[in-house]
Amino acid sequence: MLDIQNLHVAVDGKEILKGLSLSIRAGEVHAIMGPNGSGKSTLSYTLAGRAGYDITEGSIRYKGEDLAALPTEERAARGIFLALQYPVEIPGVTTMTFLKTALNAQRRARGESEFDAVSVLRLVREKAAALKVPEEMLKRALNVGFSGGEKKRLEVLQMALFEPSLAILDETDSGLDIDALKTVAEGVNALRGPERAMLVITHYQRLLNYIVPDRVHVLAKGKIVREGGKELAHELEAKGYEAIVKDAA
Amino acid sequence: MNARPTPAEILRSNGLPHRRMEDWKYTDVRSVADADSFQVGAHASATISFSNAIEAAGLEGETIPNWASSAIASLAPSSAMDAAARSYVDFSEVFRVPAGKRIDVPLRIEYSGRGHGAAAIFVEANASAEIEVVYSATVKGEINTSLLVFIGEDAHASLTVAAPYARELVLVNTISVAQDRNSQFQAQVVNGGARLSRMEMNVILNGEGAEADLSGVSVLGDEAHADITTRITHASPHTTSRQLFKKVAGGKSRAIYQGKISVKEGAIGSDSRQTAKALLLSDRAEADLKPELEILADDVKCAHGAAVGDLDQESLFYLRSRGIAEDEARSLLIHAFLQEVVDGIDDEKMRASALEFIDKGMAWAMIEAS
């Protein structure tokens, strides 16, 4: 599904990722853990194709294609979804309008027929109910005045709606209380499946108690410094990043 | 009999407004026109058609009654342009909405010719009227118009002005409004600019409790120029003014907002709010926003804000990461920026036409400056 080789990425001329390699197969859930400043968000933005994240060396192949050549919106249409750490507030665009526009834009790009307003509404309502997203939220401006938990639930709602092949969750646990965390994790787990890969990026092990990964990678100073099974997350929690990173060096 | 001075004579003796005059800094009429530019043949006149409902309200007789002339004279022209246009007012362009009468079909003033034109509308006590001013996009040349609106006690007047982008047009439009006690005035402008466009709104809140609410959307592209200048005078206690102007400027266009609020001595309890925001879509577009406050009374509330910005890159990325193509994402964000003004339009039909106007203008605005 995703094959990253020796990836170097610079932001504003400063190299953040320094030779990262990572491979994820369909059906797998991988976690990337790392201290602040290790390059976690840079990796997620690079995968989503944000302007200003320049690949200076290495390659990213997604479903066999060179990802770097595709603009952001085409990556989305081909099934890459990034749940942002800080979802953006957009006054003047209602959440429902946004969901409909995005869903139909992706379908159009894939040569599928667009959904009419009634079908979208029905689909969104069904997914929203499962994630305990109140209908009133859908009528409000996108993310405006939403609590941290509401924003994250809306990200997962989008994921449920777009049904991506590769979902990247960037610090989806940050700012969530335990109940919101459980709701979000349940939503994510419901989307696990043999056709879908997930990359869960987190600072803390907490989220991984709820979304149990197949593989854990430790990212430090722009490189993967250790890999292991889900037990690696517990080891990190017990020893702290410093010890693990030092051992690896 | 002494002939009264022609508009050209007025312009010649006063000179055309130019950029060295503080109020015309961004709009140099002299550089694009001269005193004779606004004339067409022997009879310089913009075509004004009061196409509906107004017959019932038109003044009888062939001369302007004294009460109307003195009211008109009490509002001094704000510029040589205003003076020149007003010299053309005669009985056929003065209208009265009698006390207590509510006109539910808008009075429509359509400018489709060139030259000078003026009209005065009296909305008497407890009366209500809607006024629509429309400029055709196909007009070329020079148009200079003045509109005077007198709003009586407890009366209500709403004004909409729609002026699509007219590349070869020089347009100066001065609207002067005088409001009596507890009267209400609402104005909504949608414009796309012109080679040179100046839209002035001068509102005097004469009577206690009078309220004025002005808003506008400018969607500019190509080499459009659009100057909206407002002057609100709070002359009596407990008067209220609201202003919200939003501008989108693409191509090599130039958006201007100058807004002066004066609170006169004794106008206690006045409440004034003014917001002007501009969104620049290209490196070669320009926006100049100039709020100005002059407060001579105590116990007043004045809030103003002005901001010029680019499309938010964070928002653009978010939308694109959801599969929305760049152009559509930009268009969505521009709509979102303007939505606040559209939301403030109560009338459903007007709201729809404002949205349509925005859609059309956006096609221009989103073309990158070449």
Image (spheres, helix red, strand yellow):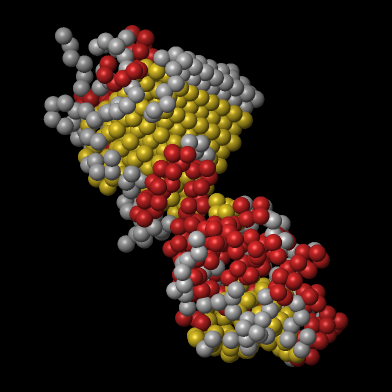
Picture residue at 48% right of the left edge, 30% below the top: B186
- Image quarter for residue B239? top right
Q: Residue B264 location in percent, x, y?
A: 54, 22
Picture residue at 40% right of the left edge, 51% below the top: B359
Is any part of residue B146 visible from this angle?
A: no
Residue nearer the viewer, B13 or B165 = B165
Q: Residue B21 location in percent, x, y?
A: 36, 34
- Image quarter for residue B144? top left
Please give left or right for residue B268 compared with residue B24 in the image: right
Residue nearer the viewer, A32 or A74 = A74
* Quadrant in the picture for the C terminus of chain A: bottom right
Q: How many marks?
A: 0
Decide: is B359 above or below A194: above
Picture residue at 34% right of the left edge, 30% below the top: B108
Residue farthest to the left? B41
* Quadrant in the picture for the N terminus of chain A: bottom right
- Image quarter for residue B151? top left
Picture residue at 53% right of the left edge, 26% below the top: B211
Q: Residue B8 location in percent, x, y?
A: 20, 27
Please give left or right for residue B243 compared with residue A88 in the image: left
Decide: is B133 above or below B183: below
Please give left or right for residue A182 compared with residue B248 in the image: right
Is any part of residue A82 visible from this angle?
A: yes
Q: Residue B141 location in percent, x, y?
A: 22, 40
